[in-house]
Amino acid sequence: MDGRLAWEHRRAMGGRAILILCALAFAGCADCLAIGCDDSLSVTVTGVASGEFTIRVEDRDGAMAATRSCDPTSCPSAMALFPDFDPTRIEITVTVGEESRSQTFTVDYEELRGACADCRFGQVTFAF
């Protein structure tokens, strides 16, 4: 190929590559919408020995509640995620063995903006 013909070939391929990338980007967005994005709350518990414990989260109105049983495998770093849970005022109860402690939190949720979906994510730390 002479220089001009090679340049025309690269230019045509570059244009096709851009079209392919755009199509893939839109296809990825469709997949993203199918997967979705959940609002969620992350609770980290400090001050517990590496054993089993239970975390119960409940909104102050009593309309939403969720419980997670944790151990070092199911809740690494003593952190539990509660999907589809995003009330602003919550009460958390942590139970270790026979001992339970409760604390009330006001959660500041961060708005996460993705290419295809928006989510609210909050996190709190419970000192046992």
Image: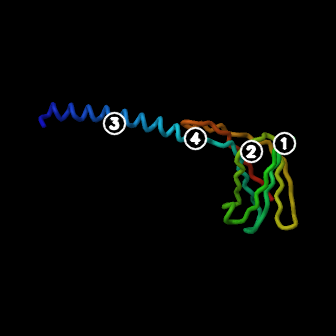
Q: First in sequence: mark 4 or mark 3?
A: 3
Is 24 positioned to the left or the right of 67 in the image? Answer: left
The residue indicated by pointer 1 is 63
Query: Callout 4: 10 Å neighbours few (<14), some, many (20+)?
Result: few
Amino acid at dot 2: Phe
The residue indicated by pointer 2 is 85
- Residue 107 falls in image quadrant: top right
Q: Circles 1 and 2: CB distance less than 8 Å?
A: no
Q: CA distance from mark 4 to mark 3?
A: 26 Å
Q: Of circles 4 and 3, which is in front? A: 4
Residue placed at 43% from the left, 38% from the top? 24
Q: CA distance from mark 3 to mark 2?
A: 42 Å
* Circle 4: element type: helix
Q: First in sequence: mark 1 or mark 2?
A: 1
Is 25 positioned to the left or the right of 9 in the image? Answer: right
Amino acid at dot 1: Ala
The residue indicated by pointer 3 is 17
Residue placed at 71% from the left, 60% from the top? 78
Task: Note whether 17 is above or below 50 in the view shown.
Answer: above
Query: Callout 2: 10 Å neighbours few (<14), some, many (20+)?
Result: many
